[in-house]
C-alpha cells in the first residue's frame, strides 16, 4: 500500500502532522458585557428620574400652592313649569291644582354662574365639571362644563345651564311637589357637582383633587326666581 504524498513529505522532513486548531466560543464574555451595559443604563435612568423628581418637588414647595376658590355666585331660573296627569296644572302662574295627582312632571331651566379664583403663582388646570339638579333625592337633569386652564393670579367666570324637560315624578313625590308649589310657593332643589383641578408647574400637573359642590336652592314658581341659596364646597385641598 503506497503512502499518501502528504504523509511521505512529512516523514522525509522529520515533521509530524499538526493537530487541528481548537475553537473556544466567546458567548460568555459578550453576555457579561451586555448585562453590564444594561445595568449602567438602568442606574443612569433611575438617577435622572430621581433628579427630575427632586427638582420638581423643590419648585413645587417653593411655589407654596394655595387652595383655589370655586364659588357659586348667581343662580337664575329661566323657566319652571309643573304639570300633572289631572286636567289641572301649574305652569308658573300659581294656579292651584288637585292635591293628589297620580304623577307629575317638572320642566326647569336653571342658569348657574360660578367664579373661579386662582391665588397661586402658577396656573390651574380644571377638568370637565358635571352638575346635577335633584328634588328630594331624585335626579332631574344634568349639565357639564368643559375643562379649562386658568392663569396665575386670575379670576374667571364659569357658566352652566341645567335644563330639565318633563322629568316624571311618582305619586308621593308629585304630591309633595304640588303641595310645595301651590301652598308654600317654594320648591327646594339641590345642585350637586364635581370639579377636578390640578396645579401646573413647568408643564407638569400635580395629582388631581376633587371639589364637591353642594348647593340647596329654593325656587318660587310664581316669581320664577330664587328666594334662598346655601352652598358648601368640600374636598378642595392641595
Image (spheres, rainbow, N blue to C red):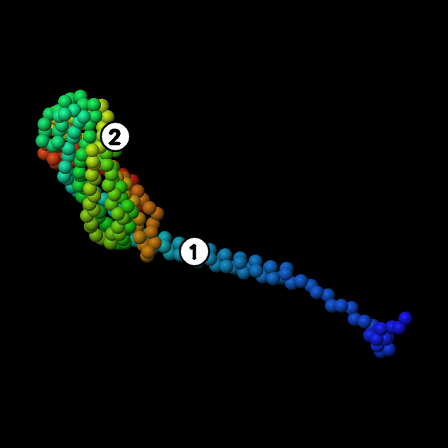
167, 36: nearer the viewer:
167
Please identify the residue farthest to the top as the structure is shown: 100
Question: Residue 153 at x, y = what percent?
Answer: 22, 53
Q: Residue at x 32, y 57 (%)?
A: 202
Element assignment for label 2: loop
Query: Which mark, residue 49?
Result: 1
Between the C-alphas of marks 2 and 1, the distance is 48 Å
Please identify the residue farthest to the right as the structure is shown: 1
Question: Residue 60 at x, y = what percent?
Answer: 33, 53
Query: Which mark, residue 76?
Result: none
172, 71: nearer the viewer:
172
Decide: few, some or many residues near mark 2? Use Cα within 10 Å; few <14, some 14-19, many ≥20: few
Quadrant of the image containing the N terminus: bottom right
Question: Residue 126 at x, y = what percent?
Answer: 28, 48
Describe residue 6's horizontal placement relative to residue 238 as left or right: right
Question: Residue 106 at x, y = what percent?
Answer: 19, 32
Asked if residue 198 is positioned above or below residue 235 in the image, the reply reads below
Q: Residue at x 31, y 52 (%)?
A: 200
Residue 16 occupies quadrant: bottom right
Foreground label between 2 and 1: 2
- Kindly identify which residue carries mark 2: 137
Q: Residue at x 60, y 62 (%)?
A: 30
Amino acid at each position: 500500500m503506497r503512502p499518501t504524498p502528504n504523509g511521505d513529505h512529512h516523514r522525509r522532513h522529520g515533521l509530524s502532522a499538526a493537530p487541528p486548531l481548537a475553537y473556544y466560543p466567546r458567548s460568555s464574555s459578550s453576555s457579561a458585557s451586555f448585562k453590564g451595559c444594561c445595568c449602567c443604563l438602568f442606574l443612569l435612568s433611575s438617577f435622572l428620574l430621581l433628579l427630575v423628581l427632586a427638582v420638581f418637588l423643590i419648585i413645587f414647595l417653593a411655589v407654596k400652592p394655595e387652595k383655589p376658590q370655586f364659588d357659586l355666585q348667581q343662580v337664575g331660573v329661566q323657566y319652571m313649569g309643573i304639570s300633572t296627569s289631572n286636567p289641572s296644572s301649574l305652569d308658573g302662574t300659581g294656579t292651584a291644582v288637585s292635591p293628589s295627582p297620580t304623577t307629575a312632571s317638572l320642566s326647569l331651566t336653571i342658569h348657574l354662574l360660578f367664579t373661579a379664583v386662582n391665588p397661586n403663582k402658577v396656573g390651574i388646570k380644571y377638568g370637565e365639571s358635571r352638575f346635577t339638579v335633584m328634588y328630594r333625592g331624585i335626579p332631574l337633569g344634568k349639565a357639564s362644563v368643559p375643562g379649562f386652564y386658568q392663569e396665575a393670579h386670575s379670576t374667571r367666570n364659569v357658566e352652566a345651564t341645567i335644563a330639565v324637560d318633563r322629568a316624571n315624578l311618582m305619586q308621593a313625590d308629585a304630591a309633595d311637589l304640588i303641595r310645595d308649589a301651590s301652598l308654600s310657593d317654594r320648591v327646594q332643589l339641590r345642585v350637586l357637582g364635581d370639579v377636578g383641578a390640578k396645579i401646573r408647574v413647568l408643564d407638569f400637573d400635580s395629582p388631581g383633587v376633587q371639589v364637591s359642590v353642594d348647593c340647596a336652592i329654593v325656587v318660587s314658581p310664581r316669581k320664577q326666581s330664587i328666594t334662598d341659596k346655601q352652598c358648601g364646597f368640600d374636598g378642595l385641598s392641595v
